[in-house]
Amino acid sequence: MYKRVAIYSRVSTQDQKTLEMQIKACEEYATARGWKVIHKISEIGSGTKKREKREDLLKLCRQRNIDVLIVWKLDRWGRSVPDIVSTLQELQILGVQFVSITEALDFTTPIGRAMSGLLAVFAEFERDMLSERVKAGVNEARLKGKRLGRPPTAKDQKEEIESLWKEHGNKSLIARKLGLSRRSIGRVLS
């Protein structure tokens, strides 16, 4: 039974000329494995932007129209380790196998599936480390007396609002001056 393959290729900017090379390498890999390429999806854009074509490809995977997804290099697929791992986990749940030919990650093999597990462990480690850094930063800010949480609301500025009301008698003027809404000013004054 042949496998239905999708190839995903991406470059960051228009002037990069590696799309054809990526597609050709992925096609050769699929052919060598006896698989049939049914989708070739290419995308041009920075890693920080929404990857709409990648999302379209994931929809095809969710519809069970693809058996194997091939990329030239892992960083072409995802923006960060958590992004890569979460999409790889989704593909695994969907039964779609993943291949990144440059890194020799072939999740259709037992060794590739083991690597998939290691990637998940590293992603969890990275999330835990980030959480610890955030908590340490919050504690440090508290020790330095910095105010945390939501910025002050109209209720916190009640005295100033009442003073300005006595002086000007104009809710719009007070709202502009304090960067609040007229409605908030009205609630404080009522």
Image (cartoon, rainbow, N blue to C red):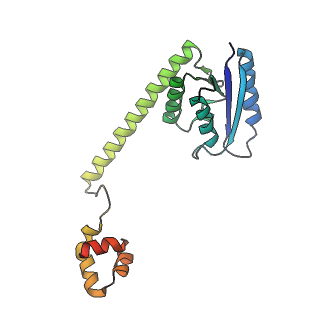
Residue, x 59% and y 26% (percent of image)?
64
Q: Is residue 176 above or below residue 129?
A: below
Residue that extends furthest to the front in the rendered view of this protein: 63
Left or right position of 160 against 65: left
**Could you say where residue 41 lies in the image, as x and y percent from the top left?**
69, 35
Q: Is residue 89 above or below residue 3?
A: below
**Can you say which quadrant of the picture contains the N terminus?**
top right
The answer to whether any part of residue 29 appears in the image is no
The answer to whether any part of residue 157 appears in the image is yes
Residue, x 74% and y 30% (percent of image)?
23
**Could you say where residue 188 lies in the image, as x and y percent from the top left?**
25, 72
Q: Is residue 3 above or below residue 76?
A: above
Number of marks in the rendered image: 0
**Could you say where residue 87 lies in the image, as x and y percent from the top left?**
53, 32
Q: Nearer the viewer, residue 90 or 17?
A: 90
**Could you say where residue 47 lies in the image, as x and y percent from the top left?**
59, 43
Q: Nearer the viewer, residue 124 or 166?
A: 166
Left or right position of 87 against 138: right
Quarter assignment of residue 133: top left
Residue, x 63% and y 23% (percent of image)?
68
Residue, x 59% and y 29% (percent of image)?
61
Left or right position of 141 against 46: left
Quarter assignment of residue 168: bottom left
**Can you say which quadrant of the picture contains the C terminus?**
bottom left
